[in-house]
Image (tube, grey):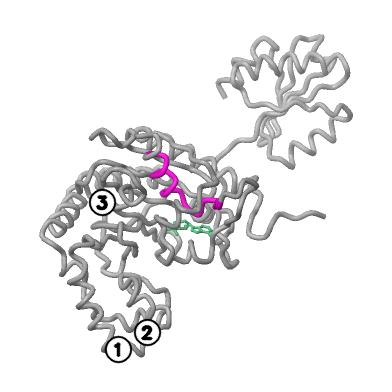
Amino acid sequence: MAQSVKGMRDLFGTELRWFQHIEETARRVFERHGYGEIRTPILEELEVFKRSVGESSDIVNKEMYQFTDKGGREVVMRPENTAGVVRAAIQHKLLTSSDPVLFYYIGPQFRYERMQAGRYRQFYQIGAESFGVATPEAEAESLLMLHSFFTELGLKHLLFSINSVGTPESRPGFHAAFRAFFAERADRFCEDCHRRIETNPLRVLDCKIETCQAALEGHPVITDHLDEASAKHHARLKALLTELGLPFEENSRLVRGLDYYTRTAFEVLSADLGAQSALLGGGRYDGLVKLLGGPDVPAFGWAIGLDRLAMVLQQVHGDVPHTPPALLIPLGVRAATEALKLARTLWDAGVALQVETRGGALKKAMTSANRTGVQTVLILGDGELDAGTVTVKHMATGEQEAWPLGEVVARLVKS
Ligand code: AMP
């Protein structure tokens, strides 16, 4: 029997209902904030990711679904969506005026990762990118939007974890202090950190290995080395979050490792799972648009792992609140025709309804209804047709009543 490809899964039932609910909530909340959707292709030229995500990253190094197409092009199934959105915004000259440009996206991403729980090779992200505004106010607006989004999904106990990584110009001062700190205890850091301290020192701060985290105790803090403008920016963002009542903590180890990231880096933590865990990460990436060949336009954005968010919501709330459609069971040939006519009127009126079209015994149909949790069953037989009624059975109570045919639509629309 054929199986789905390793790391790729089918979505259906409760998990898919959460995906849909999250996506609907995202669209509603983001559009309320003036963001418009953008959909970019799954395949992009290899160059897009090499130049943006960077050749030193794990994603580009090891994890990309990369191949040569029949025309000899080096293409990649996107491992993330920011690079594609920036590529599209440049290509279509959407960033040429000084107006802010606000996009969100929802879609699959592909990374050839080692298999572990909650990690897939096809996974889904929801993200938002705002172009053209360099202010802390733009960041606060984006964080407010995230706060509404998570609140409307019923996730409470949120905490914004924030940091500033300064600008490429102000970073050498921090790098020097940090390298000196590292050198004093170099033997306590892992091999990867030894490589990182040469190529990308900030990345040492978010090494996942516990002994490295322990060795970082007392490390120099980036926010002590900020240029004046970045320090002002950071202070203003904190003041705004305080004014707006968005709970936050400062985390000096929270970084985005690539050079085009500037100033604000942040994560959203949720205590809903017991241990606090990050639901998403993002930050300011003022250098990326220019790096990909566009104008020098500032940008701020983030990406949420949809798979993980759906998992958290399922653990917190169980299933998405939903009612299975009512079931209309016709008995006999005459009723089968009339049932389709009645169903059509009900569907047109917006009623969710399934029709038992298998024919056959009432008992079998009722067993299915019980199994699938149907709450209202309508039975239409010759007796009902002659009387001009429908028998309605309320499954929760077992109560049964006769409704005049002419009133079925109105009564079901109301319920
Ligand atoms: P990143 O683009 O690596 O910053 O990831 C952003 C979010 O995407 C993470 O917080 C995860 O929730 C999610 N994510 C990244 N990689 C995977 C994966 N392989 N499977 C499932 N979710 C992922």
| Amino acid on which disc 3 is placed | Leu
Q: Is mark 2 within 8 Å of ligand 1?
A: no
Name the mark on residue 189. Answer: 2
Q: Is mark 1 within 8 Å of ligand 1?
A: no
Query: Which residue matches tag 3?
Result: 246
| Marks 2 and 1 in Cβ contact (< 8 Å) | yes
Q: Give the quadrant of residue 361.
A: top right
Where disc 1 sits, the SS reads loop
Query: Which residue matches tag 1?
Result: 185
Q: Which residues are magenta?
A: 74-89
Q: Is 104 drawn above or below residue 166 in the view shown?
A: above
Q: CA distance from mark 2 to mark 1?
A: 8 Å
Q: Outermost residue toward the left?
A: 228
Q: Nearer the viewer, residue 24 or 342?
A: 24
Q: Is residue 80 magenta?
A: yes
Residue 293 x %, y %: 34, 46
Compare marks 1 and 3 and give the one earlier in the sequence.
1
Residue 377 x %, y %: 72, 28
